Each structure stands twice: as structure tokens, then as C-alpha cells.
Image: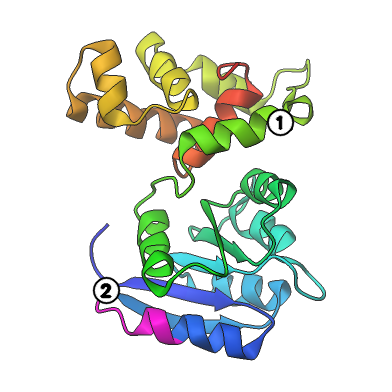
């Protein structure tokens, strides 16, 4: 991704919110275009301002961060923003729910300034902030909730549109392999893997690798 990253910060604590905004605004490649105090305000501002990344707290009064994320990045959303969840609560349940809601990454509030900056850049670039292996472990733990229904869905039809090689790449992504490891496994070039990843994300209507891993588990490709 090229150009300046446009970031919206959402946290109900003014001091925390201002701190994030100060850190991110100091980066030459970032611009903080707004600050929101709760999820409802974040959704409204994101729809109006169209940021590249929304830095989102989870526990807030009114509309919480997970519900706000679902409105911005869940099924049917018209927002192009990617959501980075940042919270002081290191609970697997929160990570799981955040990813299911459409978040592209998850970090804790005790992350360093450098880690926060890197997290925003990583999410903006469409990469998984959590490693696929960590995501796989979380989804495996909550796997019973991910069983797809028996009726045909749009996602089922999207999955059927994948070529055999694209499906194989998706399966390997779900096992925790990065592009280089997938290339070695399939005996193809790294650039070819990147092309397959881009194609399957586009066909499935997914934003990044985190969502691809979730999708793979939903459809039995990560077991």
C-alpha cells in the first residue's frame, strides 16, 4: 500500500486515545483523521471519513468495539476500513470474537509505541497481525461455533469457485504456513504464491490472511 495511511482512533479513555493519536501522527506515513469515544461514534466517523485503518478498543459504553467492528468489517459492510483491535484484556474469547467480527488484527494496550505503529502498517497492508498458527489455535478451541450450516450459502458458492491450487494454498495458509513455506511445499515461486493468495482473497471477498484462516476453518479446510 502506498501513500499516507489515514487512521481513525477509537477509545473511551481520552488520555489513551490522545496517546495513540500522538504516536501515530508522528509517523511520516500516517495521518490521524479523527478520534472517537465509543463504537457508535467510530462507525459514524468511519463511514464519513473512510479511514484506511480503525484502531478500536473493545470494552466501551454503548456500542462496544466488537459490535462496531462487525458493522465496519463484517458481512455486508460498505466500509473499506480495516480494524485493528487494541485492548487491555488478553482473553482468547475477545480475540476470537474480534476476528469473527471482521477485525484484521489484535494487540494489547501494553504494546510498545513501535509495536502499535507496526501493527497499523501490517493491518493496512492486508497482512495478518496474529500469526496464522495462533489464529488456528484460537479457532480450533472454539471450533464448534464455526460449523457451517447445511444450506448452500454465498460463501459455499465462493469456495466452489476456487481452483484446486487456490484451495490447496488456502488449506496451507490455515495450517500456519507463510508464503515462502507454501512455495516450498508446492514447489512453486513466492510470487506465484502471492498471486494465488490475492486471487483467492478476491474470490472469497476476504480482506486478509486472518479472515482467510477463519474462512478455511468454517469450511473444514483447517482441520
Marks 1 and 2 sit apart, C-alpha to C-alpha, by: 38 Å
Nearer the observer, disc 1 or disc 2? 1
* Percent of width and height locating residue 68: 69, 63
What residue did someone put label 2 on? 29
- Out of 166 and 120, give the one closest to the viewer: 120
Q: Residue, x 53% and y 20% (percent of image)?
A: 159
Give the crowd class for mark 2: few <14, some 14-19, many >=20 residues within 10 Å: few
Give the crowd class for mark 1: few <14, some 14-19, many >=20 residues within 10 Å: few
Q: Is residue 44 above or below residue 79?
A: below
> What quarter of the picture does the C terminus occupy?
top right
Q: Is residue 8 magenta?
A: no
Dot 1 falls on a residue whose secondary structure is: helix
* Percent of width and height locating residue 213: 53, 31
- Left or right relative to 161: residue 154: right
Q: Is residue 55 above or below residue 206?
A: below
The single residue placed furthest to the right in the displayed view is 62
What residue did someone put label 1 on? 141
Quarter of the image for residue 173 reads top left
- Out of 93 and 38, give the one closest to the viewer: 93
- Out of 216 and 3, give the one closest to the viewer: 216
Q: Earlier in the sequence, mark 1 or mark 2?
A: 2
Q: Is residue 10 above or below residue 136?
A: below
Quarter of the image for residue 27 reads bottom left
> What quarter of the picture does the N terminus occupy?
bottom left
Q: Give, as a single range, the part of the protein colored magenta.
A: 22-29
* Percent of width and height locating residue 72: 61, 59
Amino acid at each position: 500500500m502506498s501513500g499516507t495511511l489515514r487512521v481513525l482512533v477509537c477509545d473511551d479513555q481520552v488520555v489513551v486515545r490522545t496517546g495513540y493519536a500522538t504516536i501515530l501522527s508522528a509517523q511520516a506515513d500516517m495521518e490521524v483523521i479523527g478520534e472517537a469515544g465509543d463504537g457508535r461514534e467510530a462507525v459514524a466517523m468511519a463511514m464519513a471519513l473512510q479511514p484506511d485503518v480503525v484502531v478500536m478498543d473493545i470494552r466501551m459504553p454503548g456500542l462496544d468495539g466488537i459490535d462496531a467492528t462487525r458493522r465496519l468489517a463484517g458481512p455486508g459492510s460498505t466500509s473499506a476500513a480495516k480494524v485493528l483491535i487494541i485492548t487491555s484484556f488478553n482473553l482468547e474469547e475477545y480475540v476470537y470474537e474480534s476476528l469473527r467480527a471482521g477485525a484484521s488484527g489484535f494487540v494489547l494496550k501494553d504494546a510498545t509505541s513501535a509495536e502499535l505503529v507496526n501493527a497499523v502498517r501490517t493491518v493496512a497492508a492486508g497482512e495478518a497481525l496474529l500469526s496464522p498458527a495462533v489464529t488456528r489455535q484460537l479457532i480450533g478451541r472454539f471450533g464448534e461455533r464455526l460449523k457451517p450450516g447445511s444450506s448452500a450459502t454465498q460463501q459455499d458458492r465462493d469456495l466452489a469457485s476456487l481452483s484446486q491450487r487456490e484451495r490447496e494454498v488456502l488449506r496451507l495458509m490455515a495450517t500456519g504456513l507463510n508464503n515462502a513455506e507454501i512455495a516450498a511445499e508446492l514447489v512453486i515461486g513466492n510470487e506465484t504464491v502471492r498471486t494465488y493468495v490475492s486471487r483467492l482473497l478476491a474470490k472469497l471477498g476476504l480482506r486478509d490472511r486472518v479472515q482467510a484462516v477463519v474462512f478455511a476453518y468454517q469450511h473444514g479446510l483447517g482441520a
